[in-house]
Amino acid sequence: MDEFFDPVGVAVVGASSRPGKIGYEILKNIIEVREDVYPVNPAAESILGKKCYNSVSEIEDRVDLAVVAIPSEKILNVVKNCGKKGVKGMVVISGGFRETGNEQLEKDMVNLARKYGIRIIGPNCIGIYNAKNGFNTFFQKDMELPGRGNVAVLTQSGTIGIGLLENFADRIGISKFVSYGNKADVDEIDMFSYLQKDEDTDVIAVYMESIENGRKFFESLPDKPVVILKSGRTPLGKSAAASHTGAMATDHSIFTGASRQYGAINADSFEEFYDITRIMATQPLPGGGRVGMITNGAGPCVIASDHIYHSKNLSLPELKPGADEHGKDKFSELPPFAIISNPLDLTGSATASHFLKGIEAMGRDNNIDIIMPFFVFQDAPLVESIDELHEGLESMMKWMDKTVVAVAMGGKLVKEQASRMAEYGVPLIEEPARAVNSLDKIVGYARWKNESGGS
């Protein structure tokens, strides 16, 4: 799979000289990060300062990868030319295959490619992105691409992938990204094998509409957390999936049962998909489901408590004043107006110092596995000391071995704090139920991992 993420020589078949055309934008995006790019267009002499070629086989230099954006009826000739050149991989951006009823053409393309030893991502996709070197095959403009991180994204839908990338761009980085559309050749199983060995990847996020070989899929899951958003769960969803990528969706109850057995984490919405992934990418797995909440405004904690009550894996233990392992009263440094309970209510008078002392106390409490600070950043005492809060939390995260997930509700101010917290690895979720539901599934995964003896 290295030919997709770090190729030597890239041919863009269907390169266009017209801005706004798919072939132009792909070429432009690739040229921005590398020199060994070769546009293929018989009707042009050069595009963006690069010499054009009539076919891939005429390129003098080595070409590992061909990115293809041409009408589907021309694909077999392109495969032959790539085969003659010794191309190892093709990203077929073009549509017009199984999703439009041209299933035989898609099969012929794959069979011909296999004769030449070529692997194909696509068709009907936006291709790949490697954050390590910036290489991508996208035709989108003005996308916010995330920097380097430890999450790999695999998706049948380019649109879902774009949404994740732009969400991650502000708060978390990625390692590899693959949009494989119809997944005529390369699929999740191939990528699992590759990502298992990828030192840059710790968490894998998968959006899928179909699963062709369920048993092999689950038996191929790597020894890394895999978060899945599976659509096509209903008759309407299955119909939409068939028209989108030609997917044949499976029975969802069977899929969820297999996920529980093999330790995949199933998300129920895009928001949950994003939340679970970023918590897994930035925080240690919780040692249990005991949650400690701390707040300067208790309303969101009440909502969270209702959801914890109905959760499968979380609890809200009583906070008990008393000495820690160093003989120091855990809560002795809190202000007299603090209400020592769970949630630990610091009231609207709370400053950054109060929050930091409370979070540290919970960090040293053996009866707490997960710390959830609920911030009302808009309260004057807290916002006036906001820099102290971030400096203290950043320092604390260097020794804290518990899962920390913050919650805050609001607009611009909250988004600014979420971005700052992301810089030192604390995810901030904007709605209490989202945070609780995501943590519930993560604790379930941690228990499965412990019981199954997973590494």
Image: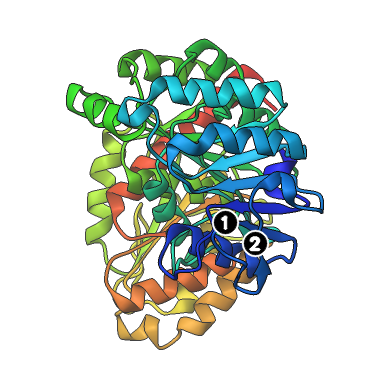
Q: CA distance from mark 1 to mark 2?
A: 6 Å
Q: Position of residue 51 (x, y in %)?
A: 68, 66
- Asked whether the residues under the numbered discs 1 and 2 touch, taking CB atoms below 8 Å apart as contact, a structural biologist would say yes
Q: Amino acid at mark 2?
A: Cys
Q: Is residue 405 left or right of residue 193?
A: left
Looking at the image, residue 227 lies above or below residue 148: above
Q: Amino acid at mark 1?
A: Asn
* Residue 316 seen from this side: no
Q: Residue at x 67, y 44 (%)?
A: 4
Name the image quarter holding residue 157: top left
Q: Which mark is residue 41?
A: 1
Please give the name of the residue rendered at 25% of the width and 58% of the height, measured from the top-left corner.
Answer: 300
Return the disc, 1 or 2, that comes first in the chain's sequence: 1
Task: Specify the label residue 88 is tagged with.
Answer: none
Q: Which x, y percent locates residue 228?
A: 44, 33
Front residue of 184/444: it is: 184
Query: Quadrant where the C terminus lies?
Result: top right
Q: From the image, which quarter does the N terminus lie in? A: top right
Provide residue 404's location: percent of width, then percent of height. Answer: 51, 54
Q: Residue at x 54, y 60 (%)?
A: 43
**Which quadrant of the view contains residue 346?**
bottom left
Indicate left or right for 278 with 203 as reference. Answer: left
Q: Residue furthest left?
A: 236
Identify whether 331 is placed above or below 286: below
Relative to 40, say whether 191 is above or below. above
Relative to 381, does residue 419 appear above or below in the rendering? Answer: above
Q: Which residue is mark 2?
A: 52
10 Å crowding of disc 2: few (<14), some (14-19), many (20+): many
Dividing the picture into quadrants, the one containing residue 348 is bottom left
Q: Is residue 329 left or right of residue 237?
A: right
x 23%, y 43%: residue: 306
